Image: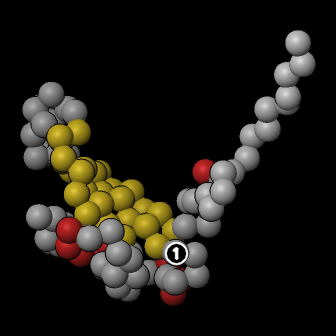
Amino acid sequence: MFSAPVEAGKGVGEDAAYAREMGFEQRFFYVAVGSDGENQFEYICRAFPGTTASSSTANAVWQVQRFTYDTSDRISTIAFAGDDDAYNQVCANRTTLDYD
C-alpha cells in the first residue's frame, strides 16, 4: 500500500507556529507575596519588533497579560490589561493597569 509523504508546514492562510513570536520584545515579571500562591502574579509584556525605542518599557506599545495564582500555586486567571489584547499599554505600569 502506497502512502503519500506527510509534510510539515503551514495551512492555507496560516503562519508557521514558530514565526508567531519570532523577534518580539518580551519581558517577564513575577511578583510573589506569601508562600501559598495567593496574591502571586506573573506579568508578560510583549511588543512588536522595532517598536520599542531602546527596549523602553515606558512606551505605550506593549501588550500586557497578568496571570493570577490561587492558594494551590495554580494559575487561576489570565487577563489582558485594559481587557484588550491590543499593543497599546505601558509595560512599566503593569502593576497598576486595569485587568477587569
Q: How is the image coloured?
A: secondary structure
**Residue 97 seen by the camera:** yes
Residue closest to the far front: 1
Q: Position of residue 49 (x, y in %)?
A: 57, 75
Q: In terms of depth relative to the viewer, which is nearer, 70 or 10?
A: 10
Q: Write the residue at 75% across / 40% down.
A: 8
Is residue 80 rendered to the left or right of residue 62?
Answer: left
In this rendering, the answer to whether 26 lies above or below 40 is below
x, y (%) of residue 80?
A: 25, 63
For disc 1, the marked residue is: 48
Q: Is disc 1 surrounded by few (<14), some (14 to 19) or many (20+) residues within 10 Å?
A: some
Up/down of 87 relative to 33, above or below: below
Q: Foreground: 74 or 2?
A: 2
Residue 34 x/y as whole percent: 10, 39
Mark count: 1
89 to 17, vertically: above or below? below
Which quadrant: the N terminus? top right
Q: Quadrant of the C terminus?
A: bottom left
- Quarter occupied by residue 65: bottom left
Q: Nearer the viewer, residue 75 or 28?
A: 75
Q: Residue furthest right?
A: 2
Please name the amino acid that badge 1 sits on: Phe
User: Residue 8 versus residue 70: which sits nearer the camera?
Assistant: 8
- The structure residue drawn at horizontal position 24% and vertical position 75%, both measured from the top left corner, is 93
Q: Is residue 100 left or right of residue 85?
A: left
Residue 35 visible to an observer of this rendering? no
Q: Residue at x 42, y 62 (%)?
A: 27
- From the viewer's perspective, is residue 78 above or below residue 82? above
* Label 1 secondary element: loop
Q: Position of residue 41 (x, y in %)?
A: 21, 50
Residue 59 shown left or right of residue 5 in the figure: left
The residue under the point 38% across, 65% down is 45
